[in-house]
Image (cartoon, rainbow, N blue to C red):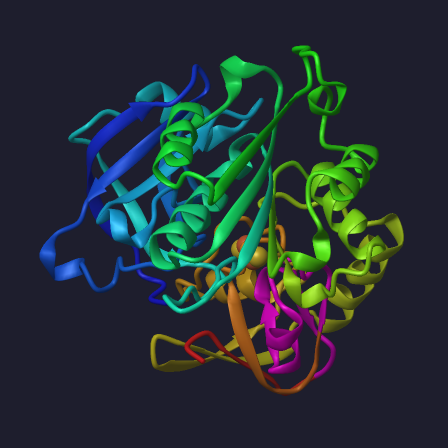
Amino acid sequence: MSAAFHLLTIAEIVDETAEARSIRFAIPDALADEFAFKPGQHLTLKADILGEDVRRNYSLCVAPQDGQVKVTVKRIAGGAFSNWANDNLEPGDQLEVMPPHGSFTWEFSREAKNHYAGFAGGSGITPILSLLKTALLTEPDSKFTLFYGNRDSQSVIFLEELGRLKNRFMGRLQVHHFLAEEFEEIDLFNGILDRAKCDLILGSLIEPEEVDAFFICGPGPMMDAAEEALRQVGVPADRILVERFTAGRPSAAMAAQMQELQEQAAGMAMIVTLDGRKRRVPFSAEAGNILDSARLAGLPAPFACKAGVCATCRARVLTGEVSMAARYGLSDDEIAAGYVLTCQSVPKGEGVEVDYDA
Ligand code: FES
């Protein structure tokens, strides 16, 4: 992934619901390769909002076969970027956009005969729609079952598109809606996707052992509920893919431990490689992590969430040891290969060398 931002023009804006809009970008031919993506990946958008450099990741809501680069932005209460984007952006405006990245994806192949399932809550449908469409378009013998939770029918993003896809992929796509504040006759479909509901789903609507991969994206408690329910019935971890865009607060004990490490690491020299250039950078306790120490020293190290979930700030530790507060954005394989989230990392001693290009 290139960490560079590109100024892209907005080609189209589609109001999906009262609270969410999709933004399609025009991609110049020269950037077509850089903006090629895998299903389920996201873009980092950047804007100057009231003098602050605000960055957020938004999932692509399309399949690579659609030939479009489009993300969906839903308002969140108090959200600086999401509200600004919903209130201000118009076709023709320009926005700084980092090329697609993210590991919430799957290698679909024409010969596969798989059953996939998705648990989506609210705007968590966005990457799952991308995966679902790609699965059905790429694999003629595969099927997809979606469990999609929302407040009420007005707030269901892509309601019509899902209906169209159901007709188009008759018999291969099943969509089950769960509404928290609207009631229908079958009780199973009333209420939120909590642990009890996920247990019921796994006992009645799907045979977990027949599913090749589960994709989960939505509010934190919903993702935890779905993941725990799947683990409880014995689904192995490598068949459960989770995409988190927000993180819970670190525990008080973890926060205290990180503060101690930050103080110990103050002033330690680190070597940071970025865009092919190596620089010596002191760790700053005030900055609090390797990413912000590098940025304080003038290196444009990439970031988006600064909460340990998006992996935009990922780098590889070449020498030395670091402590990482949160690691949601990394897979076990990446951690084993020496990758860390620099927004969450503090050197444990002298001699740490990290490489953003690796
Ligand atoms: S900036 Fe998102 S994980 Fe570090």
Residue pictured at 63% horizontal, 57% vertical: 211
Looking at the rendering, the quadrant in which ligand 1 lies is bottom right
Look at the image and say whether residue 344 sits in the magenta stretch.
yes
- Pick the front one: 158 or 100: 158
Q: Quadrant of residue 118?
A: top right
- Pick the front one: 183 or 289: 183
In the depicted structure, whether residue 338 falls above or below residue 196: below
In the depicted structure, whether residue 246 falls above or below residue 110: above
> Looking at the picture, how far across and down is residue 272, in whole percent?
49, 78
> Looking at the picture, how far across and down is residue 354, in whole percent?
54, 79
Q: Quadrant of residue 112?
A: bottom left
Whether residue 51 is visible: no
> Looking at the picture, how far across and down is residue 198, in whole percent?
76, 38
Residue pictured at 80% horizontal, 47% vertical: 229
Residue pictured at 44% horizontal, 60% vertical: 302
In the depicted structure, whether residue 178 falls above or below residue 332: above
Q: Quadrant of the N terminus?
A: bottom left
Look at the image and say whether residue 62 sits in the magenta stretch.
no
- Pick the front one: 79 or 193: 193
> Looking at the picture, how far across and down is residue 235, in whole percent?
75, 60
Residue projecting furthest to the front:
171
Q: Would residue 195 be found to the left or right of residue 151 on screen?
A: right
Residue pictured at 69% horizontal, 39% vertical: 205
Q: Would residue 269 be found to the left or right of residue 347 on screen?
A: left
The span picked out in magenta is 323-349
Q: Quadrant of the C terminus?
A: bottom left
Q: Would residue 80 be found to the left or right of residue 247 on screen?
A: left
Report how many numbered discs are placed on residues in the image: 0
Residue projecting furthest to the left:
29
Whether residue 53 is visible: yes
